[in-house]
Amino acid sequence: MFPRLRSALSAVMIVLACLLAPCGTLAGWAMYEPADTGRYVAAMAPLADDPGVRDAVADTLGARFAGLAGRAGLADEAAAGPVNGGVRLFVRDAARSFTRTEAFHEGWDTANRTVHDAVLRALRDDGAAGRAVTVDLAPVTERVRDRLTEDHVAFARRIPVRHTEVTVLPARAADRLRKGYHVLDVAAFWLPLAAVVFAVTGIVLAACRRRAVTAAGIGTALGGALLALAVVVGRRLTVAGLTGPVDGPTTGAVYDALTETLRTAAWLLVALGLTVALVSWLTGRYGHLLRHRRAPAESPAEPAPPRPTRTRL
């Protein structure tokens, strides 16, 4: 009865270890990849060259500056009354031209860093409960105005730079994310450690440790494959669920940039698990054959026949 209990307990430990491995990988990625400002900005930087991102930013900036120009009375130089279609088109073309400059890449990185820092401060500050996360777009507006001035746009200098607070996260969403962030902070440390402890314990308790190692490797590979599948499904759900000026292929590009490390980690789990299982299986198989081949050579020699004894008469 005791060997059966040990085998059952070993199987439970190994199954738990295989389940916790992908969960720990996901928690570690969530804590140390998107939560790291430098890595986040580096992941988002290539998107500045994405045509969908540039078009969305240009349309947003063009509409915004056309509205500012109309409120500031800048359209009087072109036509009386509000900004006409020609001026709006001119401003939008200037914004599209700006998105192809080095200044736009710098502004893109600065904007992502500003938003990311604001969100992280809100998530790590327990005293910010009940408050929305906001950022000031005045530096971005000033940067665009300076670039338009360098491009000799006539009315660029008269575009007002106003401190406009834009809500990045509503208060309820920020509170939910804050709770989730604290949970991930704990899980990112304890889940991988628990997976290792359960795996070692399951292997030690197993009646056949080689088979336990093989099972742990196969289970780890399956967990990594499920994690990779979850990333693919999450991409489809994200692209289908988000709407707005940046959607479709652009949203997919953002998702791919943010989850690149997670996909790599998932396939590393698959490779590690398959390697451990294969080495364990090969070691057991060829070790068994080698022992059988050495058995005849190491068997004791047959005893020599007894020497005849002489009898005395």
Image (spheres, helix red, strand yellow):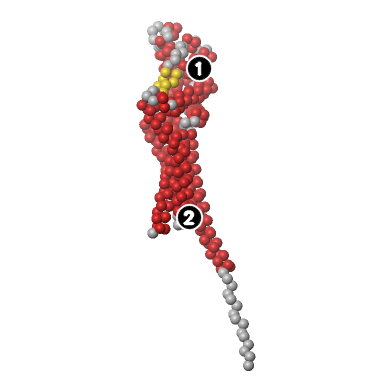
Q: Residue drawn at (49%, 15%), measured in percent from left and top? A: 142
Amino acid type, residue under disc 1 in the picture: Arg
Which of the two discs, 1 and 2, labels the residue nearer the N terminus? 1
Q: Residue drawn at (40%, 6%), measured in percent from left and top? A: 80
Image position, residue 276 (x, y; %): 50, 50
Q: Camera-side residue: 145 or 99?
A: 145
> Circle 2 is placed at which residue position?
209
Q: CA distance from mark 1 to mark 2?
A: 64 Å
Q: Camera-side residue: 176 or 127?
A: 127
Q: Is residue 154 left or right of residue 67?
A: right
Q: Camera-side residue: 148 or 38?
A: 38
Q: Which of pointers 1 and 2 indicates the residue nearer the eye? A: 2
Image position, residue 226 (x, y; %): 42, 43
Dot 2 surroundings within 10 Å: few (below 14), some, or many (20 or more)?
some
Q: Secondary structure at mark 1?
A: helix
Amino acid type, residue under disc 2 in the picture: Arg
Say if 241 sits above or below 15 in the image.
above
Dot 1 surroundings within 10 Å: few (below 14), some, or many (20 or more)?
some
Q: Where residue 143 is drawn, which disc sits there?
A: 1
Image position, residue 26 (x, y; %): 44, 38
Say if 238 sits above or below 222 in the image.
above
Q: Quadrant of residue 66?
A: top left
Residue 220 visible, this orientation: no
Q: Residue drawn at (50%, 24%), measured in percent from left and top? A: 109
